Image (spheres, grey):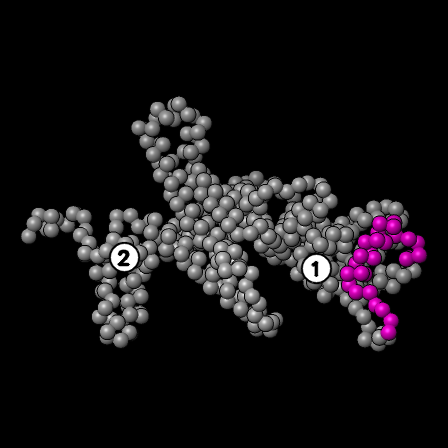
Amino acid sequence: MSSQDSDPTSPPTHPKIDPILRNALRYTISAKEYKTLHQYLIVRTPPAVRKRAPQPPRYSSIVQTNDDFNAAAVRASLRVFVASQTGLNLWDLIITHVIRRARPQKSRSNGFLFRSPNFRLSLSLSLILLLHRLLFRFFCRLRINLLTKEAAPFRRRNPRISQSLTSRLAPAIGASLAGFALGVYPADQLRITIAIYVAAQAVEFLYNALENDGWFKDKPWWWGSWMLMPLSTGQLLHAFVFDRDCFPKAYGDFILKNTPRYVQQRPASYPAHLSWPDTATIIDSLAEISRMNWPKELRALLSRIVRMTTFFTGAIGTSWGSICLFQYLFPRTFIPTRRWLLGGFLGGLWALVLEPGSARANGMYSVRMSVDSLWKVGRKRGWWKGITGGDLWVLVAGMAVLGGIYERDPGAVRAGWVRRGLGGLRGEGWSDKLAEKKDVEKDQ
């Protein structure tokens, strides 16, 4: 027996196997995962299959390596791709054949897989995970190397660059560049929604971090998350009346469904030979009435609605009813169109009756819808112009803020699923480290 064979510290010797096959196995399933697969699945297969499948120790020796980080990152991204692609195609199948019961349509991809929206979304999500892990590790290693004594001359020559790259937040901010991989997906509403959602989460957790640092310790008693609702609801109601093409359709359908007293449907007893305005016509007429400074002839028509308002509670009823009330309280030419903003603001005040957690959740949802709508209204009216890939910049900025907050104050990220997601993006495992730490402290 040679000294190399008897030395336990010597590098492991791999069984003779094709290098391409070895790498394919490494990037497909880890030794730990194969052991679990073998324990619960392979042992239940026919003897011929079990005989051909390698035992866990042999498989471990085949794929063993000193650094499995890159292979683990590729494995995770491949699984995200397969899972998301399968889920999206299954959802399309359910929507097409079960819910809508529509006939199968020809694919618009024209034979090119890359033109499929589902494929490109799955590819972009998997690339975000892969690039985020690789970039995070790269900037971590770069930071460690720049802090060594050997890098002192570089730090003296480039103080500003060194200060940026050696910052504790540098890996989190650098890894956020992976968000640009969402550009693989076509620029449509889903991409904008993802960007706004990530940015809104970043702002919410930034507020939590500042609150933990004592920035709002002297805030007044009335300060709270309920304040989000009036502002966002006011903008949404105004956009719903004047710029409905810039309003979230699902949210608009919800409003109309819950306002039958104000936007009435065709009565069942109404003569069939007479026309009845549809919902869009009614809303457009309200917008035109506002632009006409609310003619005096409408006062008698609206009086019955004012008397009914007291019987309805909630944001939607208040928003619509207040418009009728303003007709009596305000002069015709006083904020004829902006009163919709005020009506929505009053409707949003119903957030005061919600619990703080529920008020924040509903408020943040309304804010996201409002930001999306306001951006579209601004572009439509020429208030601002969009830039190519602007939603990607918003996404990257949101990811940078989220990563920085998680690095500096994990407790400010008060959603466990977000902490697990950030840990998975960094390659630290899909687990909530903060919750696990608290559990250990309780046991002690």
Instruction: Name the side, left or right, on which 335 lies relative to 203.
Output: right
The percent position of residue 233, horizontal first and vertical second, equals 70, 53
Which amino acid, by three-letter code, is at mark 2?
Leu
Tell me the number on the disc at residue 389: none
Figure quadrant of residue 274: bottom right
Determine whether, in the image, residue 374 is placed left or right of residue 422.
Answer: right
Write the residue at 45% across / 27% down.
160
Q: Residues within 10 Å of mark 2 (few under 14, many from 20)?
A: few
Which residue occupies the foreground of this view, 398 or 314? 398
Q: Write the start and end of the magenta stretch as one range.
A: 273-299
Question: Residue 400: in sight, yes or no?
Answer: yes
> Which is more toward the observer, 101 or 337?
101
Residues packed near mark 1 inside 10 Å, few (<14), some (14 to 19) or many (20 plus): some
- 283 is higher (above) or lower (below) than 152: below
Q: Measuring from the top left, give residue 395's x and y in whole percent.
A: 54, 46
Disc 2 target residue: 21
Q: Quadrant of residue 174?
A: top left
Q: Are marks 2 and 1 in contact (CB under 8 Å)?
A: no
Asked whether, in this view, residue 402 is left or right of residue 382, the answer is left
Q: Seen in the image, is 259 located left or right of residue 395?
A: right
Image quadrant in which the C terminus is located: bottom left
Q: Residue at x 51, y 50 (%)?
A: 184
Which secondary structure dominates the residues rendered in magenta? helix
Viewer-proximal residue among 382 and 41 = 382
2 or 1: tag closer to the N-terminus: 2
Mark 1 lies on a secondary structure that is helix
Marks 2/1: CA–CA distance: 55 Å
Q: Which mark is residue 252?
A: 1
Amino acid identity at mark 1: Gly
